[in-house]
Image (cartoon, rainbow, N blue to C red):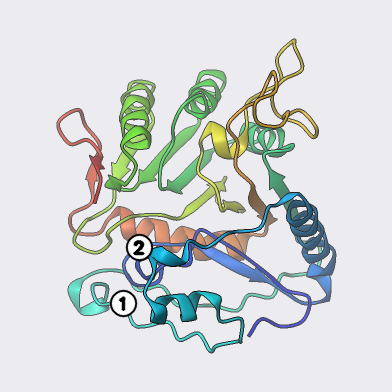
Amino acid sequence: MLPTAAAAVSSVNWSPTSVTKNREAGAVLSGSAAASAVAFMAAVFASDWALATSLTVNSSAFTAASLATITDTSSIELTIPASPNVDSSSGCYVTPSLPLALPAGASVTVAANPDNAYDELTSRLSSATSTVEIYIYQVTGSTCDVLLDLVAAKPALNVSLLVSPRVYGECDCEAANACYPRLAAAGIRVRKTSTQCLSYAHEKFWIVDGVRLGWSTGNLSPSDFGVPLNPSGVGAGADAYPPFGEPGWAKTNRDFTVWVDDAITAATYRKVMLADWSADGSIDWSPYSQVRCGF
């Protein structure tokens, strides 16, 4: 049960594979210091709820038992099963769930994607002076250019990218495999996690200069972070996305992205990335070792 005034922001979906087979990452924001961030996310939820439409269940597609489960509105206790394929004896890194108290002066920023999330992302990445370390499910589309522009502007910057060895969606997989050779050619080291430990590396987080952490429910993809404004005014930014079917409509997702400027928190996430980076079976991306599409 989440404490009062708390919100979970994570890459985890409500699916068995997310909690038993994938690498996921996120955090629960709680406490009095998190109250304004939680209130902001609750307001976004309420706004989206007001625009949503009711789900109509096709009862003929389900058994009576399944339909009873679907329509049951009573509360249930959630028990997360142990992962069947990740344990320390197999050499796979097992992540603990750690409560971290942010020190006084630590900065926490929450962005609702797409809205102004693109501007927040590019601003923070461009502030890097030494390293940018990214551990993510996929990088696709025009967001690939964000990283290319970053290393072009700062040739001395060390950028490393750890990605999922598999991407389920065929189109997303093709887009990722189109992006990664461009990044590798620009000097960014792209590496795939081990399939011995994880079905998918589904987390989405990045660390700037080893001390500033960002994580999201969305990937580094145009649909998650939007696209920059163009002269017509269509693109990233509040009220810049017209409804479906209207001129200027763009395919975008609702996501949340959290930024924490705290070295201890960043180090906790970085430990996971470094362990998976060096795990048995993790290999550098190459034209001969591309991301696998599908399951």
For the residue pair 233 and 66, the one nearer the viewer reads as: 66
**Horizontal and vertical percent position of residue 152:** 51, 18
Quadrant for residue 72, please give it. Answer: bottom right
Reading the chain from its start, which is encountered first: label 2 or label 1?
2
Up-down: is 81 above or below 136?
Answer: below
Describe residue 30's horizontal placement relative to residue 93 as left or right.
right
For the residue pair 75 and 267, the one nearer the viewer reads as: 75
Secondary structure at numbered mark 2: loop
In the rendered image, the residue lying farthest to the top is 231
Up-down: is 219 above or below 23?
Answer: above
Inspect the image, locate mark 1, and give the three-letter code of the amino acid beneath it.
Answer: Ser
Inspect the image, locate mark 2, and give the three-letter code of the amino acid beneath it.
Answer: Asn
Describe residue 285's horizontal placement relative to residue 151 as left or right.
left
> Which residue does the image show at 60% across and 42% down from the upper left?
253
* Neighbours of disc 2 within 10 Å: few (<14), some (14-19), many (20+): many
* Neighbours of disc 1 within 10 Å: few (<14), some (14-19), many (20+): some
Q: CA distance from mark 2 to mark 1?
A: 9 Å
Return the residue at label 2.
Answer: 22
For the residue pair 7 and 44, the one nearer the viewer reads as: 44
Return the residue at label 1.
Answer: 83
Tell me whether the residue at label 2 lies in contact with that at label 1, contact meaning CB atoms closer than 8 angstroms.
no
Quadrant for residue 174, please give it. Answer: top left
